Image (cartoon, helix red, strand yellow):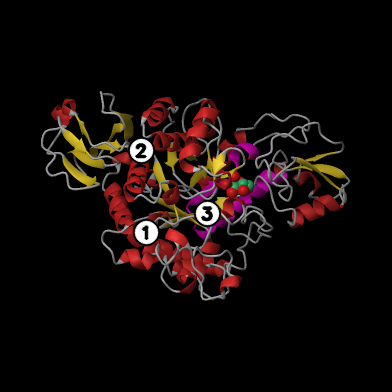
Amino acid sequence: MADRWYSEAVVYCLDIDTYADSDGDGVGDIRGLIGRLDYLARLGVTCLWLHPIHPSPNRDDGYDATDFYNIDPRFGTLGDFAELLHQAQNRGIRIIIDLVVNHTSNEHPWFQSARSSPDSPYRDWYVWADHEPSDRHQGMVFPGEQHETWTYDRTAKAWYYHRFYKFQPDLNFTNPAVREEIKKIVSFWLQLGVSGFRMDAVPFIIELTESGNPNSPKDFEFLTELRQHVQWRRGDAVLLAEANVEPDQLPTFFADSGGSGNRLHMLFDFMLNGRLMLALARQDPEPIIEALRDTPALPEGGQWATFLRNHDEIDLSRLTAEQRNQVYEQFGPDENMRIYDRGIRRRLAPMLGNDRRRIELAYALQFSLRGTPVLRYGEEIGMGEDLSLPGREAIRTPMQWSYQPNAGFSTADPEKLVRPVIDKGEFSYEKVNVTAQRSDQKSLLAWFERMIRTLREAPEVGSGSTTHIDVAMPPGVLAHRADGRTGTMVFVHNLGTTDAEVDLSMLEPEADLPIDVLADRNYGEVGKLDRLKVAGYGYRWIRLRRGQGL
Ligand code: GLC
């Protein structure tokens, strides 16, 4: 189904610079990634989300571009990128890229020109104030690392606005020339063959920044405009957006009041992410049940993207202080594991004590909940973090491919690596790597391959509707179902440590030879649904019934 391909996709995100280095300079590159496409195809992912690929001084891991029409020379050339698109397509894998147009790097020629003179044609491409704005110290995204949102520029003799770091001046999207440029950037990459974009910082892009007003209004019409533009250029392209806002504001990002999905196709479900963490920490599914109940209905074509980990911190800002503390206690007990007064800078496996049962449970849960699952590189083998690295870099270490030096990531001298590989402790590459797990049918990697393939045989999760099965359950157990054209799946996950027995006999009338298609162990025949066993930290994905005519 080409038109809604994203509903049934499995997305995998990666940084080119830490994935695979083909030329031994210590930095991952496009050729290296091409060499790993067969690995990704075997894993079963259908779409890659590449973190920023443009030239950049890399002061925010590429989220500070100096040229939107090019490839970071460390990664290769536009020619290499076209080859990547071709090779990925050959394997049935689509590619989406980060679109970071809220701001540029301060080294971008547009900003350099803008600051040089009030008469520069680029002056109005950025947001300026002549006098110190009263909200100068408000609205920071990176508290602790960022101290203001307006900075005085001596050359420009004016204050410029930056929602993020001060080396990331915000573009003035109220300027029609900037809007046109954004559309041109989008067209350029679509024409090359990308299947869409992960749009960075959307609530800030559409902000009509007024100096002195930390809650400036937003212009959602731009999203409608952009969607139309994207769809005219490439009918099946998708906009997957980062918009971490209050739930009541979410629907406006998908659609205008007309109700049909005419803005962004997909949003990351930050609300569910926080609740999932809380549920795992408490070993109690209630927060997930609340999330399923409270998420706003989506317009036709709208879709959530679910995730446990991405490239940033785990953002717990939408939990109450008490809930946040519960998560911190379990998953981020040391101060050094926390960041920005709201999050955790760790990978999932160490957070869950490297307990294989809990890791499987967490990912089985994420992948079975409504939406399109997004998986971060290295999670499929249970990589750890390096807390000696600053900030979010802790979870951005090189992919661990093998037992070879530098984890097989690069042949460069270790001191030349873009970031050190993890070479100590239980997450060292000698213990956690692809080569070891590839040949072990019981490995986490083998489990991920099986789980993802099972999910792809259960498209009702992505394109159907998901509901909580609201009957009495033993403590810790969540039961939910997904219904679609292809039939019905039932999922039972036990977040607690105690073995449980679940009564789902009210589903009997709908059942048609139910079978476990994925489970943490062999539970034998499903048989009657009135006494379904599920072990502590166990899970069962049961196909209840098949749909007709597929
Ligand atoms: C988004 C990205 C983050 C980046 C920021 C500024 O939040 O996810 O990594 O630092 O935007 O572009």
The numbered dot on residue 92 is 1
Type of the residue with mark 3: Ile
Considering only vertical position in the picture, is 406 above or below 151?
below
Give me the C-alpha separation between circle 2 and circle 3.
25 Å
Q: Is mark 1 within 8 Å of ligand 1?
A: no
Disc nearer the start of the sequence (1/2): 1
Is residue 139 a member of the stretch shown in magenta? no
Residue shown at 52%/67% (left/top)? 30
**Does the CB distance between marks 3 and 1 fall below 8 Å?**
no
Disc nearer the start of the sequence (2/3): 2
Q: Nearer the viewer, residue 460 or 395?
A: 395
- Which secondary structure type mostly characterizes the magenta part of the structure? helix
Q: Which residues are magenta?
A: 177-204
Disc nearer the start of the sequence (3/1): 1
Residue shown at 19%/43% (left/top)? 516
- The residue singled out by tag 2 in the image is 369
Considering only vertical position in the picture, is 453 above or below 335?
below
Horizontal placement of 306 versus 60: left or right? left
Type of the residue with mark 2: Leu
Examine the rendering and report whether any part of residue 255 can be seen: no
Examine the rendering and report whether any part of residue 248 can be seen: yes
Q: Secondary structure at mark 2?
A: loop
Considering only vertical position in the picture, is 448 above or below 480?
below
Of tags 2 and 3, which is closer to the observer?
3
Q: Residue 221 location, x and y as percent?
A: 61, 33
Q: Secondary structure at mark 1?
A: loop
Horizontal placement of 111 versus 201: left or right? right
- Where is residue 460, by image quadrant? top left
Horizontal placement of 381 versus 387: left or right? left
